[in-house]
Amino acid sequence: MLRDLYFTLFEFVRTFGALQLFFLRLLWYSPGVLVRRFSLVIGQVYNAGALSLVIIMICGLFVGAVLGLQGFSNLARFNAEDSVGAVAALALVKELGPVITALLFAGRAGTSLASEIGLMKATDQLSAMEMMAVNPIRRVVVPRFLGGVFSMPLLAAIFSMVGLLGAHLVGVVLLGVDVGSFWQQMQQSVELADVQEGIIKSIVFGFVASLLAVWEGYNAIPTAEGVGRATTRTVVITAIVVLIFDFMITAAAL
């Protein structure tokens, strides 16, 4: 049992070190890709970001609506129904917006990135690039990584804005909260530091989700089963790491 634990710990340390080196390689190649192959990055922003807009907006709308309902029913006990807007805004901007967007991004765009790169590896496309003196990390991996990093903060902002719209529709239109009090309480309660915390979280989550997606795809076993396992690991590991980083950033911001 101790031997198995030792090998498990050794494998974790080895994988973590390899992931760090892989991340440094991505950062090293990123400036050159942004300058010389910016069109590839724009294409990946479209694939990872624009194609995820529908699910982000739908989920954001209903999350905001639920916050409006729950906030109204709980605040009504204290005759503080006008604070529904403030509660929804703080919850969306600081926590639910970045976290849920990262989880949705991992489920939609992250799996797409991992499976795409893994399939290219399984069909020897990456090996063919190396035979032609083309760096597959610079040509394939880095644009997808940067596309995810740039898309994540934009998607989180859209999620929060649509969520506030959902909270407004439920709180003001359906439940009769005064529209002036709704937005006034929100403006008075949400500070610049709260918005900055949400932006920092969305940027960090973008790096985490994109890095894990391209890492799992690039290191997938070149078989159909291996690509499937890499896709599954992308979602599971990203969800765990995002929640860990969410706790760390929240604790540091207090």
Image (cartoon, rainbow, N blue to C red):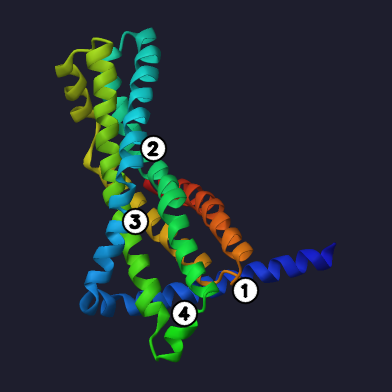
Q: Which image quadrant: the C terminus?
A: top left
Total labels: the figure holds 4
Residue 14 in the image: above or below residue 232 = below
**Whether residue 254 is visible:** no
Q: Are marks 3 and 4 in contact (CB under 8 Å)?
A: no
Pointer 2: what residue?
A: 96
Give the CA distance from mark 1 to mark 2. Answer: 33 Å
Give the CA distance from mark 4 to mark 1. Answer: 24 Å
Residue 77 in the image: state x and y as whole percent: 39, 8
The 10 Å Cα crowd at callout 3, few under 14, some 14 to 19, many 20 or more, is: many
Residue type at mark 3 is Ala
Pointer 1: what residue?
A: 14
Residue 186 in the image: state x and y as whole percent: 22, 27
Q: Earlier in the sequence, mark 4 or mark 1?
A: 1
**Whether residue 242 is visible:** yes
| Relative horizontal placement of residue 244, taking residue 176 as reference (left or right) | right
| Relative horizontal placement of residue 194, taking residue 236 as reference (left or right) | left
Residue 224 in the image: above or below residue 245 = below
Residue type at mark 2 is Leu
The 10 Å Cα crowd at callout 2, few under 14, some 14 to 19, many 20 or more, is: many
Residue type at mark 1 is Arg
Residue 48 got which mark?
3
Q: Earlier in the sequence, mark 3 or mark 1?
A: 1
Q: Which image quadrant: the N terminus?
A: bottom right
Of tags 2 and 4, the one toward the viewer is 4
Q: Locate residue 80: give its quadrant.
A: top left
Q: Earlier in the sequence, mark 3 or mark 2?
A: 3
Residue at 58%, 59% (x, y): give it: 228
Of tags 4 and 1, the one toward the viewer is 4
Residue 126 got which mark?
4
Asked which secondary structure carries label 1, the reply is helix
Residue at 52%, 52% (x, y): give it: 235
